[in-house]
Amino acid sequence: MQVWEHWTMGTIVEIMDSSMTSHSPGDQMLKCMHIGLLCVQEDPADRPMMSVVTVMLSSSTVSLQAPSRPAFCIQKSGMNYSGMHTDPYPGVSHSTSRSPMSPNEVSITELEPR
């Protein structure tokens, strides 16, 4: 299951790594997951600025808002919950020809001294 699904079901503690709970209190790990979910919310306007994230991480008294659904949710390794293989990218043709992954063009500038 995904972090978001565990969060909404109230079972987020089930995905915590037990080896980490001996090094860090569970409430700090929950706080980090909560902040992580705030940072990937679907609406970018709802995501906190990094300066706010720093305050959230360093303060023990700041109250965190409830996160909304993440911008993307990917099923683990293309398997649905019934165990049947699913296409993680439905509607996308899977041809063997090489095509750009993004329509955005990137220019790379290499600086050289005179």
Image (tube, rainbow, N blue to C red):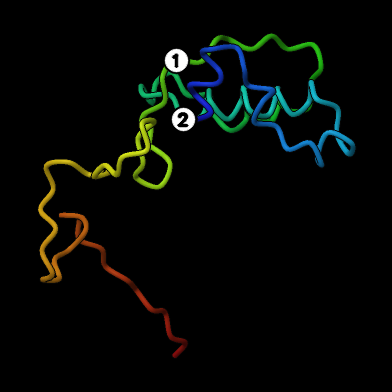
Q: Residues within 10 Å of mark 1 (few under 14, many from 20)?
A: some
Front in this rendered view, residue 60 or 24: 24
Q: Name the residue under label 1.
A: 68
Q: How far apart are marks 1 and 2 (CA)?
A: 9 Å
Front in this rendered view, residue 54 or 89: 89
Image coordinates for residue 107, horizontal then vertical, percent: 26, 67
At label 1, the amino acid type is Ser
Q: Earlier in the sequence, mark 1 or mark 2?
A: 2
Q: How crowded is mark 2: few (under 14 residues within 10 Å), some or many (20 or more)?
A: some
Residue drawn at point x = 13 percent, y = 48 percent: 92
Q: In which quarter of the image is residue 63?
A: top right
Residue 10: give its label. none
Q: Is mark 1 on a helix, strand or loop?
A: loop
**Residue 52 in sight here:** no
Front in this rendered view, residue 44 or 107: 44
At label 2, the amino acid type is Val
In-image side of 48 versus 31 (left or right)? left
Residue drawn at point x = 43 percent, y = 24 percent: 41
Q: Looking at the picture, does residue 99 appear above or below residue 110? A: above
In-image side of 103 versus 43 (left or right)? left
Residue drawn at point x = 42 percent, y = 79 percent: 111
Image coordinates for residue 29, horizontal then vertical, percent: 74, 29
Residue 40: give its label. 2
Q: In which quarter of the image is residue 51?
A: top right
Image coordinates for residue 47, horizontal then vertical, percent: 47, 24
